Image (cartoon, grey):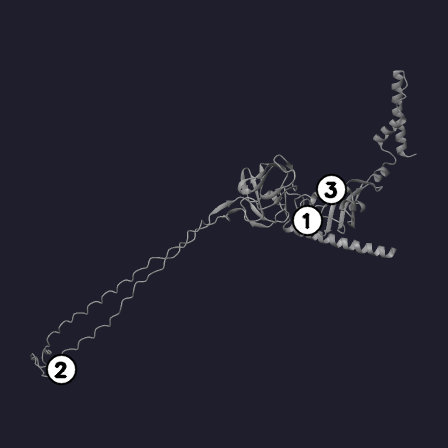
């Protein structure tokens, strides 16, 4: 007999001895104390012979499972037909919210690939919730969309798009699916600021009389030449005596110098008459543009930027058909120039992020079909394009490099599995 059996027998003997003694003391017999109770107490204290076997039988393990299939009529039934847990459909729908509608934008002929992690018991019974590792969807409407689970340094494990952008809904989203900004947030000229009514043709400028030519200045008065005088050779003579001044008698000494020729007269230039220039055009008036102008054709669907309550919906001056939604955290969004509101949208209506609330139009003070969109925080407008709540996290640097390598390994592994599966099918056929 094993040592454990001896010990168990001794323990049982002691236990029943105490029970018998207690019953004898009470002068009664306890028929409610079954043998299994004693055995349970024994195993709790001393263990059992098959304890190791029981541990192995309940030892869990995890496996990665992949499924690839073509969508038949709808995505959810096709996923179930591929024996993919329903919890993964919910996780994928939440992760892809705002990127694609799995019910309306996935149809027959689209393909999907799912890889997930599932925990099993030793007997192969699944336990716990399956965890999505990789999800790839090839659609005719939105192209290929892929999700990959990844843990950045110092962060938590979560799903990311193939470009390194975090999935899931941001606190706030832009109200159109396709964003085309025609006018940003900040100071700008008024697009409707036009000049006043025409004032008629300008009168021709009054003719300017030509100025009379000034009289030419009188010729310079000729002054008489001084009388000729005899040249004076004065000074001392070579002999030390004074030399007499004498007249040589030559005629050139008595001839007058010729009169100078008068300068040619130059007529003065007439004064220049400058034509009158038109006044410069007035500078455009600037004003503060408190939101974004998103260009779209009339009738384009507008979606709520976040969960909230509609606090206004109707005509509102320069906004045309206008709507305002209040959100938690003293945050408000404003939508202007709508052509129409979605059915049921009115003041007091509660809406969810991504819910249809209206349609793009050209009402109010507008120059063309577009949506005017504002974000107001604590009563002040902010730039929607730089508002932190409207952006998702993005992998960068070393994290992005590791993520890209992981995605590459996943694609290579799928290719290897596809080759093995094709080889097996070829052998069976």
The 10 Å Cα crowd at callout 2, few under 14, some 14 to 19, many 20 or more, is: few
The 10 Å Cα crowd at callout 3, few under 14, some 14 to 19, many 20 or more, is: few
Instruction: Tell me the quadrant of the picture where the N terminus can be found.
Output: top right
Mark closer to the chain start, 3 or 1: 3
* Quadrant hosting residue 255: bottom left
Where disc 1 sits, the SS reads: strand
Whole-percent x and y of residue 394?
63, 48
219 horizontally vs 345: left or right: left
* Quadrant hosting residue 422: bottom right
Circle 3 sits on which residue? Answer: 90
Circle 2 sits on which residue? Answer: 252
In the foreground, 228 or 141: 141
Q: CA distance from mark 1 to mark 2?
A: 118 Å
Q: Residue at x 76, y 44 (%)?
A: 76
253 horizontally vs 12: left or right: left
Q: Residue at x 75, y 43 (%)?
A: 89
107 horizontally vs 391: left or right: right
Where disc 3 sits, the SS reads: helix
Q: CA distance from mark 3 to mark 1?
A: 17 Å
């Amino acid at each position: 007999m094993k040592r454990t059996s001896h010990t168990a027998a001794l323990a049982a003997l002691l236990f029943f001895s105490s029970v018998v003694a207690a019953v004898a003391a009470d002068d009664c017999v306890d028929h409610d104390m079954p043998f299994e109770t004693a055995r349970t107490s024994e195993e709790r204290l001393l263990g059992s012979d098959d304890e190791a076997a029981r541990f192995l039988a309940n030892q869990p393990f995890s496996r990665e499972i992949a499924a690839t299939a073509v969508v038949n009529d709808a995505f959810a039934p096709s996923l179930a037909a591929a024996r993919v847990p329903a919890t993964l459909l919910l996780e994928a729908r939440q992760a892809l919210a705002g990127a694609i509608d799995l019910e309306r934008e996935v149809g027959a002929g689209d393909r999907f690939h799912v890889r997930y992690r599932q925990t099993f018991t030793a007997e192969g019974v699944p336990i716990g919730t399956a965890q999505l590792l990789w999800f790839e969807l090839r659609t005719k409407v939105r192209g290929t969309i892929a999700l990959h689970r990844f843990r950045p340094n110092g962060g938590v494990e979560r799903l990311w798009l193939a470009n390194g952008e975090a999935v899931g809904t941001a606190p706030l989203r832009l109200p159109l699916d396709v964003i085309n900004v025609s006018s940003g947030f900040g100071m700008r000229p008024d697009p409707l600021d036009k000049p006043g009514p025409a004032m008629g043709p300008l009168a021709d400028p009054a003719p300017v009389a030509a100025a009379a030519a000034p009289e030419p200045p009188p010729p310079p008065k000729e002054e008489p030449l001084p009388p000729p005088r005899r040249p004076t050779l004065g000074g001392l003579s070579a002999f030390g005596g004074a030399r007499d001044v004498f007249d040589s008698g030559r005629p050139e000494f008595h001839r007058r110098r010729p009169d100078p020729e008068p300068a040619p007269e130059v007529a003065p230039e007439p004064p220049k008459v400058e034509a009158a220039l038109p006044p410069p055009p007035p500078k455009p008036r600037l004003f503060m543009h408190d939101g974004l102008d998103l260009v779209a054709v009339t009738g384009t669907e507008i979606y709520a930027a976040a969960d909230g309550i509609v606090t206004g919906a109707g005509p509102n001056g320069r906004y045309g058909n206008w709507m305002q939604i209040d959100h938690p955290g003293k945050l408000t969004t404003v939508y202007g120039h709508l052509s129409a509101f979605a059915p049921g949208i009115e003041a007091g209506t509660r809406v969810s992020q991504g819910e249809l609330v209206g349609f793009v139009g050209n009402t109010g003070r507008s120059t063309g079909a577009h949506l005017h969109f504002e974000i107001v925080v604590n009563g002040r407008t902010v730039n929607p394009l730089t508002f932190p709540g409207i952006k998702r996290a993005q992998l960068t640097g070393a994290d992005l490099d590791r993520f890209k390598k992981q995605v590459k390994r996943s694609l290579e592994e799928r290719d290897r599995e596809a080759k093995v599966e094709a080889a097996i099918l070829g052998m069976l056929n």
